[in-house]
Amino acid sequence: MLRYLLMGFLLALPFSGNAAGFLLKDLQGKTHRLEDYRGKWVLVNFWATWCPPCLSEIPELSSLHDAHKDKDLIVISIAMDSGSSSKLADFAQAHGISYPVVNWRWKKNKKMDQEITRNFGDIEAVPSSFLYTPKGELVSQQLGGEVTRESVETYIKNKKY
């Protein structure tokens, strides 16, 4: 199974070019912009509290984020639930999510909808992840499948930036 997940991430559609950049506000009110993380890899993960693969991905993403956040990588997640931010914060705490969580409440925030669509396209499956280089270039995406700490670290190790 791990081999399949690793290959899935490594074989995800490659992209290159500079990203337009994103502007996201997490549950603590902190704003995250792609340009703020120059020099670090950025993994943006779309997920939902009701999604079993998303839930099994949480420990992997927390481990990845915790191991790299002060050095070379950050994980930012975008929850695609329609619940309140306080319920989502409680969920994140109960599940040990250590990385920033953005609450994207579909159709309730047109500005956020436009920001998400402009930068990531229509997200039709969760979990979905987007990986940016330290230069801010989108180089890989995994749509509708889990990623692991090992798959991301292996991918990054094999890329020259």
Image (cartoon, rainbow, N blue to C red):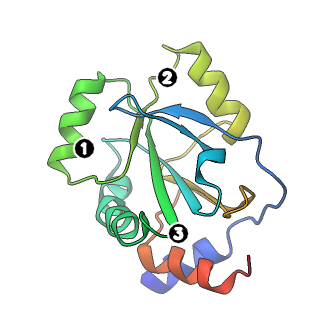
Is residue 95 placed above or below 121 in the rendered structure? below
| Label number found at residue 92 | 1
| Label number found at residue 72 | 3
* Percent of width and height locating residue 1: 42, 81
* Percent of width and height locating residue 22: 64, 38
Dot 3: few (<14), some (14–19), or many (≥20) neighbours within 10 Å? some
Q: Secondary structure at mark 2?
A: loop
* Percent of width and height locating residue 130: 61, 55
C-beta proximity under 8 Å, tags 1 and 2:
no
Q: Residue at x 39, y 63 (%)?
A: 65
- Reading the image, the residue beneath label 2 is 106
Q: How far apart in space, not on screen, are marks 3 and 1 (Cα)?
A: 23 Å
Q: Secondary structure at mark 3?
A: loop
For badge 1, the amino acid type reads: Ala
For badge 3, the amino acid type reads: Asp
The front one of 2 and 110 is 110
Is residue 20 placed above or below 55 in the rendered structure? above
- Looking at the image, residue 9 sits to the left or right of residue 145; the answer is right
Name the quadrant containing residue 43: bottom right
Q: Secondary structure at mark 1?
A: helix
Q: Earlier in the sequence, mark 1 or mark 2?
A: 1
Q: Earlier in the sequence, mark 3 or mark 2?
A: 3
* Percent of width and height locating residue 35: 66, 46
Q: Residue at x 22, y 28 (%)?
A: 87
Q: How far apart in space, not on screen, are marks 3 and 2 (Cα)?
A: 31 Å
C-beta proximity under 8 Å, tags 3 and 1:
no
For badge 2, the amino acid type reads: Trp
Dot 2: few (<14), some (14–19), or many (≥20) neighbours within 10 Å? some
